[in-house]
Amino acid sequence: MKIVMVTPFPAIQGIISGGVAGVSYYLAEALTKIDGISIEVIYPDAPVEHEKTAEFNKVRVHYLPRVRGIGSAARMIFTGPRAVKQKLEQLNFDIVHVQGVACWTNFLKCPYVLTIHGIPERDVLFRGRFTMARSLGIKLVEGWARRKAKNVIVISPYVVQVLAGELKGRVTEIENPVADSFFEIENSCISGRILYGGQIIPRKNIEGLIRAFSIVHEFRSDAVLRLAGSGAESDYGRRCKKLVCKLGLEKKVSFLGNLTIVQMQKELSQASCLALCSHQETAPVIIEEAMAAGVPVVASNICGIPYMVKNGVTGKVVDPNNYSNMAEGILSVLSSENFTNMAQAARCEAENRFRASKVARRTCELYRNILKS
């Protein structure tokens, strides 16, 4: 079976700068290990000057450049989908798997499945100006593409909860994959070390996490906060750094930048907990990676996160708008007498749900069912 995946994808092997790119990277790698499967990737609207092709672990990736001088809406609705259609005409395949951007399916006449990774009309509410108008526009164009998809993968019950009226095709729940290597991490956690993984953007509530950490530090002088992810040099990132200085936490808070997979695995091996107190999330891969590594999670009690983190078992869920509650959750995990049990429970839960080889087999089974029908 020949598969073409249409998705954001890493530009450099081992360096991932987004959740969907990470999911696609892990899934593509796992699919190639299944007998009879070959896979190519198309990355529309990629941050490259000219079209280029690269190969990662038996996966050929076609990077299609962003069309200059055209707004994001036009790229989403027309130029991106048209570029996908034209590239597909050059390839030999059985099925197409579109990840993340529903509009990339606009001109497809072949068998395909769409994975809905997030709710972009909600995500955009935490980004820049004119957010409500942009949200309505995204809901209009993405909603149309979601409605016409005959086969849809959702990564969390939260997606169905929000988009139930738009999902007219067959819906299959398949959670995001985590590379098998995360399950092999030997946990040698450093007491008081708190890790964040993700972009430094308002939606992720980094300022709130820093304020909560300042409370944690009052009770745990050994506590440190390590922020891994791109965006530290953005306006928001600089604002976060100023807050760190204002609170006198310069020696306790580190901005690590975007890490390779190997570097992130090292951070996870030394973390006492992962903290992700976002305002909006669907099913963050970093939570799955932490659980696979045996790291308890402190995360928001909203959106799709409660479907991932079992409160008091694999971590704690907290109110992302309440710094004291966030701090209490972190302190609870750091000080828990059942820390070892919580870490083991997190890894066991991840093993049952998120291991890439298992997710790939479920995805491959869906491909075959679609082609049969």
Image: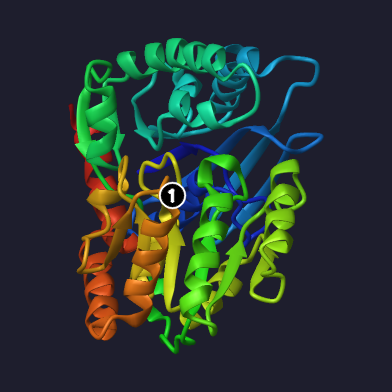
Report if residue 138 is visible in the image.
Answer: yes
Quarter of the image with the C terminus is top left
Residue 209 at x, y = what percent? 52, 57
Residue 5 at x, y = what percent? 47, 39
Q: Label 1 belongs to which residue?
A: 38
Residue 156 placement: quadrant: top left
Residue 16 at x, y = what percent? 59, 56
Q: Please report the residue visible at 35 percent of the width from the left and 51 percent of the height from the top.
A: 176
Which amino acid type is shown beneath numbered disc 1? Ser
| Nearest to the observer: residue 333 or residue 65 | 333
Secondary structure category for the residue under label 1: strand
In the displayed structure, would residue 200 be above or below residue 157? Answer: below
Report if residue 295 is visible in the image.
Answer: no
- Counting labels gives 1
Quarter of the image with the N terminus is top left
* 195 horizontally vs 227: left or right: left
